[in-house]
Image (tube, grey):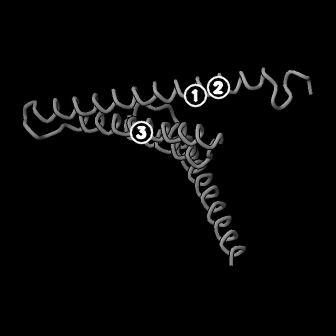
Amino acid sequence: MPRHYRRGSPLLAYLEKFEHMITRALLVMMAVVVLLATVELAYLLVKDVLTPPLFLLELDELLELFGVFLLVLIGIELLHTMKIYIVEQAIHLEAILLVALIAIARKIITLEPKDLPEGALLGIGVVVLSLTLGYYLVRRSRWENRDLDSKHKE
């Protein structure tokens, strides 16, 4: 390993500080985006509810609201993932898969199936199934590890 990349080297310490600074800046910017998306969601909800007919939402308004709502959820999950990365210096696959599942659910809710090319729904179904299976396997692995840990403590 080159001398300037050895553990405890000044270059490595500088790069780690730089990485922490960028990660924290991204976290703050993501928080601002989530806040703005939440304000946008509240604005859309109030605007749609208060336009005639009062307190009744059209289908396209509902779809738009659900899309923005899920977008806020995606932002919150990304914030959570970034927070875990800052604290533990690790990326949790479970959180990434959950964000991907929410994102694909958002896409499905806002899609117009008649506008899709042939086979696109099948492809989306395969993606959903793959993400769900991956999420299940990661969760199952975590449960099994927790069970092993509890057996070793007994």
Q: Quadrant of residue 64?
A: top left
Residue nearest the observer in this picture, 117 or 127: 127
Task: Determine contact: label 3, label 2, CB under 8 Å.
Answer: no
Q: Please rate how many residues cluster around mark 3, counting C-alpha atoms within 10 Å: few if below 14, some from 14 to 19, many from 20.
A: many
Q: Amino acid at mark 2?
A: Glu
- Cα gap from disc 3 to disc 1, whole angstroms: 26 Å
Element at badge 1? Answer: helix
Q: Quadrant of the C terminus?
A: bottom right
Residue nearest the observer in this picture, 26 or 111: 26
Question: What residue appears at the point 55 percent right and 46 percent down from the top-left corner?
Answer: 95
Residue nearest the observer in this picture, 93 or 10: 10
In the image, residue 101 above or below residue 37:
below
Q: Which residue is mark 3?
A: 106
In the image, residue 67 above or below residue 148:
above
Which mark is nearer the camera, 3 or 2?
Answer: 2
In the image, residue 40 above or below residue 77:
above
Q: Which residue is mark 2?
A: 19
Q: Quadrant of the N terminus?
A: top right
Residue nearest the observer in this picture, 125 or 92: 92
- Cα gap from disc 2 to disc 1, whole angstroms: 6 Å
Q: Which residue is mark 1?
A: 23
Where does residue 29 sit, x and y in percent of width and height? 46, 24
Q: In the shown orientation, is residue 83 left or right of residue 47? A: right
Q: Amino acid at mark 1?
A: Thr
- Cα gap from disc 3 to disc 2, whole angstroms: 31 Å
Question: What residue appears at the point 41 percent right and 37 percent down from the top-left corner?
Answer: 113
Question: What residue appears at the point 17 percent right and 38 percent down from the top-left corner?
Answer: 57
Q: Amino acid at mark 3?
A: Arg
Element at badge 3? Answer: helix
Task: Determine contact: label 2, label 1, CB under 8 Å.
Answer: yes
